[in-house]
Image (cartoon, grey):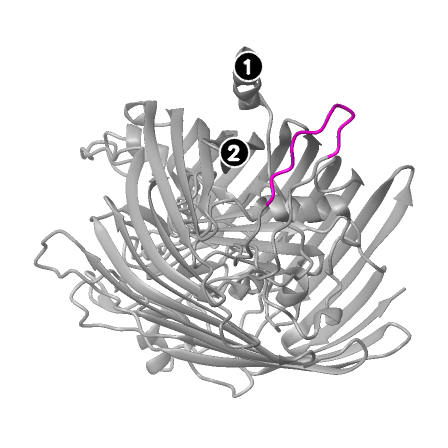
Amino acid sequence: MRKAVLRILSVASSSAFLTIPAEAHDPLTELSPVTVTAEKQPRKRIERSKPHLTRGATRANPASNRSSGSGSGGGSATDAAAERAAAMQPTAASAVTFTGQQVNAIPFSRPGEALEIVPGLIVTQHSGEGKANQYFLRGFNLDHGTDLAISVDGMPVNMPTHGHGQGYADINFLIPELIRSVNVRKGPYFADIGDFGSAGAVDIDYVKRLPKNLAEVTYGSFGYARGLAAGSYDVGAGTLLAAFDATRYNGPWDVGDDVRKLNGVLRYSQGTVTDGFSLTAMAYSNGWNSTDQVAQRAIDQGIISRWGTLDPTDGGTSSRFSVSGKWSQSSVYGQTDVSAYVIRSDLRLFNDFTYYLDDPVNGDQFSQLDGRTLGGIDARHTFDWRFAGLETQTRVGVQTRYDDIHVGLFKTAQRGLLSTVREDRVQEGNVGIWTDSTTRWTDWLRTTFGLREDFFAGHVFSDTPENSGNAQASMMSPKAGIVLGPWFKTEFYGNAGYGLHSNDIRGATITVDPNDKVTPLDRVPLLVRSRGAELGIRTKAIPDLTSSLAVFVLDFDSELLFVGDAGTTEPSRPSRRVGVEWTNHYKPLPWLGFDLDVAYTKARFTDYDVVGDHIPGAPAWVASGAVTFGTETGWFGTLKARYFGPRPLVEDDSVRSLSSFIVNARVGYNFDNGLRLQLDVLNLFDTRTNQIEYYYLSRLPGEPIEGVADRHVHSAEPLAVRLTAAAKF
């Protein structure tokens, strides 16, 4: 007994991601025993007798051969063991895993839009092509990532205490062709998800090996050009994966974006998902001009065109360099996984959202600086055991992160420095300790109970001494879930849990307005509580159709809102969202598939305020549909439609945004010799709408000194075509 206790306690310092193979599988296949290899006497194998619908049930893709980001090469016995072990992990009706083939089967205009494979997720851009995308999910305008936790190969993308907004998640370094799997989980129900994950979490894994080397070039409208080279090579006992991506793009704007992006990945790996390791280096650099959102009245009055700008010197530069590693080992004691990373990230933005409102002489352009070095470890252990004779799987884990940040806000004119608003050095760290246990009580009932404790602490060294100081906080978050079934190829799910998001630590130490150094300001809590619950169903009762329905509620003690005229996020009022998501995949033939996803959310502030209770930017209706066809060789194609419903722009709902309905299309041909020709048509029907809209005060030359309240919009790009030639060898 003492040895068993010591073994359990020892896992606090060793663990990591239990990855899910990207190969599509039938979610109703019978779950066979988890098997591990060891030289010692093996434990007794646990038999599971009844099939069920797993969280990792991937949508089948009728044209998977079109993607160069195909699986990691062959399904080994250890890969299958990892998949079966994952089937016992916490699950929800809204949780799903997609393969890289599925992601790349859909045409998209920028890397971030690859994430629209996630049901109910809208990805837009309101500035240049190097700035982080804007995300909308479950009735949230998530700005650049506030409550959507994104990771790539175990490395977090969201940045706390960021110069352009809390949770800033820049995914422009993504190479979609390398994606192995996209694991989607929504709601605060999962013990291994901490900060920024209350609305959802998207975990992206890259392949370790490409089935064939790839060379690809794309040319398109508005100066678009992209080249990609990627390949895998046997080196010693392992595999070396290398990829390089270069992109140029101007866009339809009067002042071209002049995007200059370079991106590279180098990875060495040995072994399998359950017993092996990998070392990965990534490098990304980008520079661009920005046509930011502009005042609608400037377009209406003919001052600028739909593609014009009110400050042609807006833009930015960014870079990201990382080194990461993963190590996994299985034994008679279970599965141990450890991942670690070090990232250097730099961003400089120049924006002008209000023109001459604050400074009638020089204008209101400002610059935001964020440079940081961050590192962290994710260690976890999974083991099976018997609880009163019942099959149980327990996971325990530790996650750590430390950010050393240089962050600043400056007033500028045509990118020239005028003054410093504030400049800070921030040291911020957090530790998350978590565990959950899933027990199969009967063939038709399993439950999960989890617990997470998060510790946050940091110090702000401000150029305004009154705003320097320490801040720390901790929060415990219980989680629970239940799965009933399957009956008639149908399972029922219930999930509930507490979560959190962190605020910018500078807000937790601030005492005076950094503009005048005198006006007192209230501090905000470092951590904010979220609470959520979800009921759902997933079924395959109808042949060839997989359908899921989830009803959810999500409360926040304080909403994080984007402030359009400041270019950042700030804490706001408490809120509640109640919604429903309906997701469907129908595959009547091996070469043909249909997808339909519909989501509705009612988002409201829950306190009383005479200004109203609507949450600005919160969408009610979101929908998407796709038709995909293709075989191993020959013709293939996709038609993808996305509906983004109108949103309130002010609290009383008196001003609302436009809706948008955009269709993208693809057609191509796969030759027997590995050559692929592909034509993408973006915004097929040349829809005139906006990617994003805000409503706030701004001032054009000659207007009243107090400014004018107006819509500020960023137009959706017009119809564009892109032709790709690719060769696999």
Residue 127's place in the image compared with 385, above or below, is below
Q: Nearer the viewer, residue 434 or 139?
A: 434
At which x and y percent is residue 372? 54, 34
Residue at the image point whose x is 61% and y is 52% from the top = 31
What quarter of the picture does the C terminus occupy?
bottom right
The image quarter containing residue 519 is: top left
Examine the structure image and report whether residue 38 is included in the region drawn in magenta.
yes
At which x and y percent is residue 432? 45, 29
Q: The residue tagged with tag 2: helix, strand or loop?
A: strand
Residue 615's place in the image compared with 653, above or below, is above
The magenta region covers 37-47
The image quarter containing residue 682 is: bottom right
Q: Amino acid at mark 1?
A: Leu
**Secondary structure mainly formed by the magenta segment:** loop
Residue 335's place in the image compared with 312, above or below, is above
Q: Which mark is residue 139?
A: none
